[in-house]
Image (spheres, helix red, strand yellow):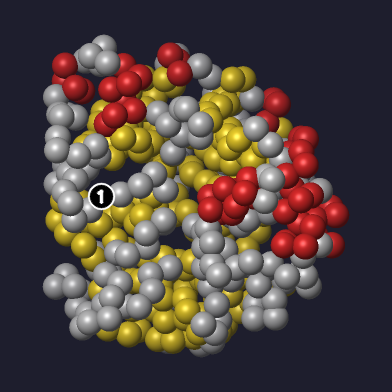
Amino acid sequence: MIINPNQLLCLILCFLISCGDKIENKNPDNTLHLKISDFTQLKKDQLEIVDLVALETTPENLMGMDLRIRCSEAYYYVFDEAVQDCVHQFDKNGNYLGRRAMVGEGPNTINRLSDFNIGTDGLLEALNSNGDQAKVYRVGADNSVSLVFAIDYIPSSFAKLPTGEYLFYGGYNLPFVSHRLIRTDSTGAILEKYLANDYSNKMLPMSERNFFESNSSLKIIETFNKVGYQFSDDSIKPIVSVDFGNYAIPSQFWELNLLEGGFDLLQEKGFANLNGFFESDDLLLLSVHIQKPTGIFKNMIIQNKQSGEKHRLDTSLADDYLFHYPFGVSEDQILFYTYRSVINKEFGENLSSDLMNKIPVGDFDYPVLMKVKIKV
């Protein structure tokens, strides 16, 4: 059984539960150490929506809330992590262009879609991680599917490097994964292994986004780890560490099997997890997912790399979807997605007419991409 972290958090309930010169708190190893409690809480009225893009929605592309969004210069690509049946493609105006990398049994389909990337040529590459082997496919503009290579490794996600090499993340799934991260050449031959897996208990394999392309660099996060990494020059180095305070993963967790005490331990006081790592020349944003006995929450810690200002945006999965789902940063703007019904509930008709005209009433509720600035 493969689950993503959001499904893991709900399952726990069912079980009873790069940086700029002005950024401070760096150790001699250049790791940035951050404490959530050091960040000043933002109120929603301190955020300004500066632009909206409505994603055209039809019966063919109805989607949920757990979306993996990647962008090229001309397109948005959206993967519904709960359904995992294809990648939906939109132009930059939000017009729907169709399904890509489709899951199925017929020609030009793949039998499982675990992750996707956008090549420098604009074509998609799709990861099929199934059984004891993974396959990378190239998806043509006509939706033709061709095998790039197969590899004897079980990754949950992958990234393609500018060199044409690949990174694969495999998690804590012993005995199948001896190292949580590997690098291969363009044919799938393993060149180097990183992050040795010394967790010997039973761990459910995860399906999660581990790689974040931002600020001309590749960032890496992983479940149950407070450290964010950067990959460069064929090496991985920790660049940020977050103090989760009372929600830090207890050390005893690593001595237990997940289904034989691990869940119970986590649900006692809750725990925190990195689930997003975005950076521009102006902003650093870390999304922290927090599971508490009372529900699921999120702290987004945002640091202005020019001024050094530290902000924290707190949201709840129970009733606050407006700014709950960041998917990137661009210059001094934060990129979120939500749904039209959420914007309408929050603002009614109080948005400017220019913005309201960009999210008309449709036959279906639909995702909306938002560009947001912190008011000075």
Q: Position of residue 252 (x, y in %)?
A: 85, 54
**Along the line of sight, the residue nearer the viewer: 41 or 349:** 349
Q: Nearer the viewer, residue 369 or 329?
A: 369
Percent coordinates x, y for residue 176 in the rendering = 64, 81
Image check: 125 left or right of 221? Answer: left
The part of the image, by quadrant, that contains residue 373 is top left
Quarter of the image for the N terminus: give it.
Answer: bottom right
Tell me the quarter of the image containing the C terminus.
Answer: top left
Q: How many marks?
A: 1
The reply to whether residue 287 is in sight is: yes
Q: Position of residue 104 (x, y in %)?
A: 28, 75
Front-most of residues 133 and 342? 342
Q: Which residue is mark 1?
A: 62
Residue 345 against residue 82 in the figure, above or below: above
Q: Residue at x 26, y 12 (%)?
A: 350
Percent across and percent down for residue 203 are 69, 67
Residue under the image location 61 percent in, 79 percent down: 192
Residue at image position (71%, 33%) is: 35
Q: Residues within 10 Å of mark 1 (few under 14, many from 20)?
A: some
Q: Give the side of residue 155 with respect to residue 35, left or right.
A: left
Q: Residue 247 occupies which quadrant of the picture?
A: top right
Is residue 277 found left or right of 23 in the rendered image? left
Q: Which residue is rendered at x = 42% and y = 31% of the image?
A: 321
Q: Is residue 155 above or below residue 70?
A: below
Q: Specify the amino acid type for callout 1.
A: Leu
Which element type, helix, strand or loop, lies under badge 1?
loop
> Which corner quadrant of the image does residue 235 belong to?
bottom right
Q: Is residue 308 above or below residue 57?
A: above
Q: Is residue 235 visible?
A: no
